[in-house]
């Protein structure tokens, strides 16, 4: 099994993820492309000491961008949306 910090790359802080956090106790993370739902669930529970009810994943394709005359492609990545148990929360997302 991989290390928790290798599975969870970074949190996604967007308008949509903030609304999901406030309404449904759902947190979004960028995760390793090879990680499965069980690995993501155990990594979040170990890192943040919370109980995870559900994990949903989505493979996001990188966009094709132009750099002058040439075309380049941003890397593909994987998004995980984690639903927490009632009463649990991750303070990592709270502002200073």
Image (cartoon, rainbow, N blue to C red):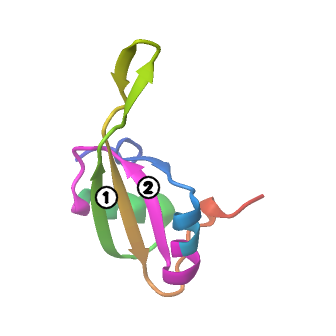
Quarter-wise, where is residue 82 in the image? Answer: bottom left
Mark 2 = which residue?
A: 29
Magenta-drawn stretch contains 61: no
Q: Is residue 38 above or below residue 85?
A: above
Q: Is residue 75 above or below residue 43?
A: above
The structure residue drawn at horizontal position 36% and vertical position 37%, both measured from the top left corner, is 63
- SS class of the residue under badge 2? strand
Q: How many marks?
A: 2
The furthest residue to the bottom:
86
Tag nearer the camera, 1 or 2: 2
Residues at discs 1 and 2 in contact (Cβ within 8 Å): yes
Place of residue 95 in the rendered image (x, y in percent of width and height, measured from the top left): 73, 60
Quarter-wise, where is residue 14 in the image? Answer: bottom right
Place of residue 43 in the rendered image (x, y in percent of width and height, measured from the top left): 36, 57
Magenta-drawn stretch contains 32: yes
The furthest residue to the front:
69
39 to the left or right of 85: left
Query: Could you tell which of marks 1 and 2 lies nearer the N-terminus?
Result: 2
Looking at this view, is 82 or 88 the one in front?
82
The structure residue drawn at horizontal position 24% and vertical position 49%, both measured from the top left corner, is 35
Mark 1 = which residue?
A: 40
> Over which residues does the magenta segment extend?
20-38
The structure residue drawn at horizontal position 48% and vertical position 81%, both measured from the top left corner, is 24
The structure residue drawn at horizontal position 51% and vertical position 53%, both measured from the top left corner, is 11
- SS class of the residue under badge 1? helix
Which mark is on residue 67? none
- Mark 1 vs mark 2, CA separation in Å: 10 Å
Place of residue 27 in the rendered image (x, y in percent of width and height, measured from the top left): 48, 66
């Amino acid at each position: 099994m991989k290390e928790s910090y290798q599975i969870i790359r970074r949190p996604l802080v967007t308008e949509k993820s903030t609304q999901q956090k406030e309404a449904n106790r759902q947190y979004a993370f960028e995760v390793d492309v090879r990680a499965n739902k069980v690995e993501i669930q155990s990594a979040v529970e170990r890192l943040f000491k919370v109980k995870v009810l559900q994990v949903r994943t989505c493979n996001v394709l990188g966009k094709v961008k132009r750099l002058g005359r040439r075309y380049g492609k941003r890397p593909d990545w994987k998004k995980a949306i984690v639903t927490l148990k009632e009463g649990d929360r991750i303070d990592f997302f709270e502002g200073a």
